[in-house]
Image (cartoon, grey):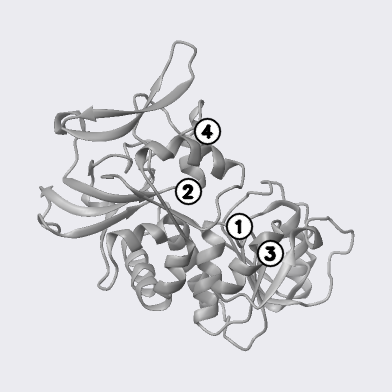
Amino acid sequence: MFKALVMDQNNDGLASASIKDLTLDDLPNAEVTVAVEYSTVNYKDGLCLSAKGGGLVRKYPHIPGIDFAGTVEASDDDRYKPGDKVVLTGWRVGEAHWGGYGQKARVKADWLVPLPEGLTPQQAMAVGTAGFTSMLSVMALEDHGLKPGNGPVLVTGAAGGVGSVAVAILANLGYEVAGVTGRPESGDYLKSLGATQIVAREELNETVKRPLESENWAGCVDAVGGAMLARVLGQMKYGGSVAAVGLAGGAALPATVIPFLLRGVNLLGIDSVMQPYDNRLRAWQRIAKDLPMDKLEAMVKPATLSDLPQLGADILQGQVQGRVVVDVNA
């Protein structure tokens, strides 16, 4: 028997969460069974934990949790053997497939990545999809010419999960980092991660008629989208790039093509869900090397399975700062 947070649907079509005892026979068929040690809470998890599943959950009962890290318990695939430490993010696990909010999980071998040397399962979940996405963003910006010394790099939604890790990675790599936040109390937190400039959300949240403004930013990791992304595009330095990773401020983009045509600005879409294996491995190895662990620990809020329903609601309201690490065995 093992414990899991299970979402069940009632007669009204609404879902609610409860901790239940399950057996290995309850798990879906797949090649690798993992003894989960830690998971985390992302925006998608908040949606999956909501009464309507956020449009992501198709079938109940369901175990959410889009990330997990732990130890292989059984494997029908030669790439993994019992005792191997592994991490999983993406592949619609926790949405279309049962995820990491349980003490056991069974998934396809193709979805797993070996835990990089130097990272513990707990640290891997402090990183999670949010931090993995941050690293993919930094890699994409670097691949398009960003280097320390080019100018300040803007991070929007900087106090959130993606933003926090992006600030820490960029600062550790020697970049001058400007963090955008709507919470004044987050300023000291962002500076502790390495931000040298704090930008109030109000300064960028208003749509302006001018398609181009002063060239302020050499690069940007944008977790907000909407009007803020449109505004940032008009403030990029010549040849600068924006890595778009989220839409907390909306999916619409009230922008013009002028920044692309007159300043050669690049808008880079970052997807973490379906990334090919080699790129996943590269990103996790970079995380182990380029994310300072002391900064990572400063972001972490510990949690247990019983905390998840409230944390799911909190993250949808923008009330979660940094990274939540869920000890599924606590």
* Image quadrant containing the C terminus: top left
Q: Are marks 3 and 2 in contact (CB under 8 Å)?
A: no
Q: Are marks 3 and 4 in contact (CB under 8 Å)?
A: no
The structure residue drawn at horizontal position 10% and vertical position 56%, both measured from the top left corner, is 81
Mark 2 surroundings within 10 Å by alpha-carbon count, few (fewer than 14), some (14 through 19), many (20 or more): many
Q: Do the residues labelled 4 and 1 touch (CB within 8 Å)?
A: no
Q: Mark 4 points at which residue?
A: 54
Counting from the top left corner in percent of width and height, residue 38 is at 31, 51
Disc 1, SS: loop
Mark 1 surroundings within 10 Å by alpha-carbon count, few (fewer than 14), some (14 through 19), many (20 or more): many
In front of the other: label 3 or label 4? 3
The residue type indicated by label 3 comes to Val
Q: Mark 1 points at which residue?
A: 223
Q: Is residue 233 something one can see in this rendering? A: yes
The residue type indicated by label 1 comes to Ala
Q: Residue 180 carries which label?
A: 3
* Residue in front for this viewpoint, 36 or 261: 36
Q: Which mark is residue 42?
A: 2
Q: Which mark is residue 215?
A: none
The residue type indicated by label 4 comes to Gly
Q: Is residue 105 left or right of residue 318?
A: left
The structure residue drawn at horizontal position 36% and vertical position 24%, both measured from the top left corner, is 60
